[in-house]
Amino acid sequence: MRDQTIGEFLEQLSARVPAPGGGASAALHAAQGAALVAMVARYTTGERYAGHAAAVERITAAADALRETALRLAAEDAAAFTAVTDAYRLPKDTDEEKAARSAAIAAALQGAARPPAEVVGIAEGVIALAGELLPIGNRNVLSDVAAATEAARAAAGTARVNIEINLGGIKDEAARAGFSATADAVGALMERADRVTDAVRQEIAK
Amino acid sequence: MRDQTIGEFLEQLSARVPAPGGGASAALHAAQGAALVAMVARYTTGERYAGHAAAVERITAAADALRETALRLAAEDAAAFTAVTDAYRLPKDTDEEKAARSAAIAAALQGAARPPAEVVGIAEGVIALAGELLPIGNRNVLSDVAAATEAARAAAGTARVNIEINLGGIKDEAARAGFSATADAVGALMERADRVTDAVRQEIAK
């Protein structure tokens, strides 16, 4: 995804092809949020912000790392999705084949739930960093703090649906419970994002 | 933006440069939502969906057009933002210069509110199309309907903050009232997006 032009990516996203789909879109939202957090941090340097220099440096590095991970997850999501499609295409003529196919599908669905679950983690990281920047960030780019949380919120919301669509087919109980817990935590994460956005809007309205 | 690679765009978004910023990010969210709606529509063709062929064809064309407009708005947002920066740099040594600068800033801020206001319109269009696809779209890509509404929701939420940040400086009362009304309508639009996402999640959970 990284080396594709935005026009090409969107063209493929709109096409009747299995990937990219919602998973790649979620990862891109997360990467946008991480980039916006890093931008606000980069505008929060110099003498005026000297007291926060260490925190700002840490936030910048963390946001840059989250962006890289998000881009990697977009690729992993596409690969995991292809594995699901491949598993469904396995032969199912004999009982043995049916059992092997069924196990392969369950394993592939479990693999497909991992990238969106990690995207939720990225979104959580972006929202946490945005919350840290809220009181200390350069006021001239305050609206970009909200832009970051809105992007991260969309990443988490999209990833949640992509986890949930795979849940039913996962046979490993512990894995299913783990993914289910990640999906269930998204609601609270969204509320946390909303609180950051609301705080930005309140400060703008002053 | 269209011809930039995703990696380059995100790198610039994270950099200490005036544009791209939240405005371009909002436009990209909107384009992602439009592309996902078009993708679901393109999977909703053939004999099985023959009864909905006309609606699906219309939705596909409308979503493709919304995607194009969103990409155009990203460029317009950057240009409008540059105009604001330029206006602030005008000389302010004499009273005449001060008045001219002040008028130029107000005009530039009004110009800067237009692209995000149009992004809200794109988001509304995407959410409406997603709502239309919800009952008729191919069930295999149902999660992408929610992915589309989450993307559109982020577009609207980000655009709202970008409208609001410009509102205070707009001197034309009618223009300010119009932009204010657009921003105020975003809350209801978000709820509409949430209803589509909730409906998708409920059907997945069945």
Image (tube, coloured by chain):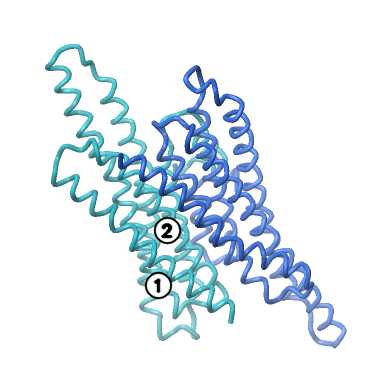
Chain colours: A cyan, B blue
Q: Determine which residue is flagged by label 2.
A: A153
Q: Amino acid at mark 1?
A: Gly
Q: CA distance from mark 1 to mark 2?
A: 13 Å
Q: Is residue B43 left or right of residue B162?
A: left
On the same chain: label 1 and label 2?
Answer: yes
**Residue extending furthest toward the top:** A93
Q: Which secondary structure lies at badge 2?
A: helix
Q: Residues within 10 Å of mark 1 (few under 14, many from 20)?
A: many
**Residue appearing at x 29%, y 30% in the figure:** A84
- Rendered position, B53 above or below B191: above
Question: How far across and down, in percent of the image, does residue B107 sit?
Answer: 78, 69
Expressed as whole percent of the image width and height from the top left, the position of residue A79 reads 33, 35
| Left or right side of B41 for B73 | right
**Which mark is in front, 1 or 2?**
2
User: Which residue is the site of mark 1?
Assistant: A131
Element carrying mark 1: helix
Q: Nearer the viewer, residue A7 or A195?
A: A195
Q: Quadrant of the N terminus of chain A?
A: top left
In the rendered view, would you say A176 is above or below B87?
A: above
- What x and y, as percent, mark residue A21? 43, 38
Q: What is the number of callouts on the image?
A: 2
The chain letter under disc 2 is A
Depicted A151 relative to depicted A160: above or below: below
Q: Is residue B148 left or right of residue A92?
A: right
Amino acid type for the residue under numbered disc 2: Arg
Q: Above or below — where is B3 with respect to B24? A: above
In front of the other: A52 or B77: B77
In the figure, residue A102 lies in which quadrant? top left
For the residue pair B17 and B70, the one nearer the viewer reads as B70
Q: Chain of mark 1?
A: A
